[in-house]
Image (cartoon, rainbow, N blue to C red):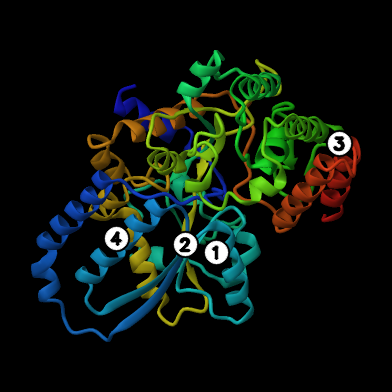
Amino acid sequence: MKKKQLFAAVLSVAMMLGLVACGGNGTSTSSASDSASVSSASSTSVSASASSASTEEKKEPVTLRMAWWGSQTRHDRTVAVIELYEKLNPHVTIEYEPMDFEGYFNKLNTLVASNDVWDIFQMGSNFPTFQSKIYLLNDFIKDGTIDVSGTTDAFLRIAADAQGNQVGLCSGVNTYGIAYDPEIFKQAGVAEPTENWTWDDYKKICLDIHSKLGIYGSSKFDDWQAGGSSGISQEGFEYGFYNSDNTGLGFTDYKMLANYMQMRADLVDAGAYPDPGACNEISDIEQDFIVSGEAAMTWVASNQFVALTNAAGRELKLINPPRKTANGPSGITIQSSQMLCVSNDSKHPDEAAKFIAFFQSSIDANKILLAERGIPTFTAVREALADNLTDVEKKVYEYVDLVGSFDTGGKPYNPASPECGEAVKEQYKYYLEKVIYKEMTADEAAKAVYDYAASQF
């Protein structure tokens, strides 16, 4: 697809974008070519800006703290942008903490309790849980500290709360998908999946690959997204796990949750899917079973696909998750990957806001970041990157475009999960394990999840 068509397709769905936490709990080692591009972009930008930096008026030294979760690729690129910013702004020092997903939120909860949250921190769809610690960007946008003329209102709204307050700036748009190894499918004599494949197809593929090759058909999935959030949306355009204004549930039949739970238990029983203990050992992308060749498929956020492919060191392909019926709703849409926020605990919120603006809208910065967090939301950045995409990055753009073409039934998408969202996810995972370990039936577990979620409103 031509780049202009791709960008037009992304922009055309922007009004429906929802906020998602990219369960980006993976790490990988960036390639030599990636490191070279980081170094080249950084040195070029610094050289071009050396004169302005050297003549910068004396400013009081400022130290900011920043943290994020993600892959090693993300860590490397983010640190390079920080170093670039420090060279362009000699009065600013940024102390950073890259982490994995679980470690990040464990640390964040500790800092919230001690009123010491990092000046700049990464958030996803669970931002309402931490909104008391987010410094709103409204005034910074109004006074021009953050220049948003290069993006759109639609892209701004996907990092805003229900009242329209700007809680952060979107780091990029992405969606969920299934990464798979075409060579493993070929070895097993199994046809590659298509965009209309179903969960029955997925189960059969997993069983066939395990039977023929003795490996897992699938590695770890985001069970909440697959069986809960997207799973309910696949029942029909009128359904969603939560209703459109996040004041209650968006479905009434708890049995809609049962089939996925039963399928997961069946695959673990057959040895075609890792048990919960093995899944817990996957703390980052480098440890995913698809990387080691022990699985044919894995769940991935589209912005993680580059890091996953780098870690695997071989060709992987990207396809949308299975549907409940071949002609039914896909259950997924283009969403915000993450956003960067300013902390209410910051002593220098204006300086933190300036860095966030640079991070999201600077062409030099984004020639280093290379859309690892998702397709950029600033027009000039997208256009600057378009001619320099790798083949793997083009696959991500094409996949996002594919998802953007899916019928959504015209339904609105929630900009964020309700405050109870994280607790509901944990209960879903808890009861799913009960089914896997045969401590509950899928029907009992589905009802327990439904009852718990309904009780939160």
User: Is label 3 in a helix, a strand or a loop?
Assistant: helix
Q: Nearer the viewer, mark 3 or mark 2?
A: 3
The image quadrant of residue 228 is top right
What amino acid type is highlighted by mark number 4?
Val
From this viewpoint, is residue 311 visible? Answer: yes
State which tag comes first along the sequence, 3 or 1: 1
First in sequence: mark 4 or mark 1?
4
- On the rendered structure, is 347 left or right of 61? right
Q: Name the residue located 26 percent from the left edge and 66 percent from the top edge.
A: 83
Compare marks 1 and 2 and give the one earlier in the sequence.
Answer: 2
Q: Give the SS element for disc 4.
A: helix
Dot 3 amino acid type: Ala
Above or below: residue 211 compared with residue 72: above
Of badges 4 and 3, the one in the foreground is 3
Q: Which residue is mark 1?
A: 104
Point 81% across, 37% down: residue: 251
The residue tagged 3 is 442
Q: Please give left or right for residue 387 compared with residue 177 in the image.
A: left
- The CA distance from mark 4 to mark 1 is 20 Å
Count of numbered marks:
4
Asked whether, in this view, residue 42 is left or right of residue 245, the answer is left
Quadrant showing the N terminus? top left
Q: Which residue is nearer to you in this view: 200 or 284?
A: 284
Could you tell me residue 28's position as x and y percent? 42, 49
Q: Is residue 18 above or below residue 48?
A: above
The crowding category of the residue bearing disc 1, from other C-alpha atoms within 10 Å (few below 14, some 14 to 19, many at least 20), is some
Q: Residue at x 43, y 30 (%)?
A: 316
Disc 3 or 2, which lies upstream in sequence? Answer: 2
Residue beneath disc 4: 81
Say which residue label 2 marks.
Answer: 68
Front-most of residues 11 and 41:
41
